[in-house]
Amino acid sequence: MTSRNRRVRIAVDLTELELDAIHEKMSRAGVRNRSAFVRQMALAGYIIQLDLAPLQKTAALLSNISNNVNQIAKRVNSGEEIAANDILEIQQGYLRLREELGEVFDELKNMTE
């Protein structure tokens, strides 16, 4: 589509910082024509709003597992025996972590489709 076919004009008010941000994004994208860039972003771009609660839950699970592994390592290094229940707890935490990460990745995948 050539510019001769574009008869409708849209005006957008920006702050200097917003204009600078657009120029920076244009530069990173290798685009020199501001109208083409803004048009492409308006037609094909999308806005992502992230709910970070699932990631915070995943980080908490990972921290819990790490703490359990560290406690077991300290016991082993000091010559103590490890209870089978301790290993089972880590395995269950790992499975919960994998499930949580799967859900996070599914959400991210759905955002891009």
Image: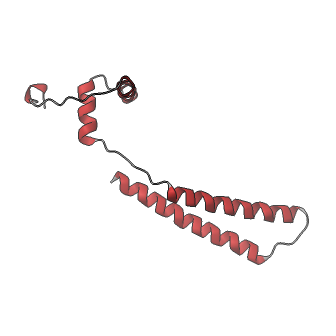
Which part of the image, by quadrant, shows the C terminus? bottom left
Residue 18 percent coordinates (x, y): 36, 28
> Above or below — where is 39 with respect to 97?
above
Query: 51 or 15, which is in the foreground?
Result: 15
Query: 10 or 107, which is in the foreground?
Result: 10
Query: 18 or 43, which is in the foreground?
Result: 18
> Above or below — where is 106 with respect to 14?
below
Which quadrant of the figure has residue 28? Answer: top left
Which part of the image, by quadrant, shows the N terminus? top left
Q: Residue at x 53, y 56 (%)?
A: 55
Q: Residue at x 13, y 26 (%)?
A: 3
- Report whether 110 appears left or right of 78: left
Q: How many marks?
A: 0
Residue 65 percent coordinates (x, y): 68, 63
Residue 100 percent coordinates (x, y): 53, 64
Q: What is the image's colouring?
A: secondary structure
- Report whether 53 appears left or right of 36: right
- Report whether 63 appears left or right of 86: left
Q: Residue at x 79, y 63 (%)?
A: 71
> Above or below — where is 4 with respect to 87?
above
Q: Residue at x 64, y 72 (%)?
A: 92
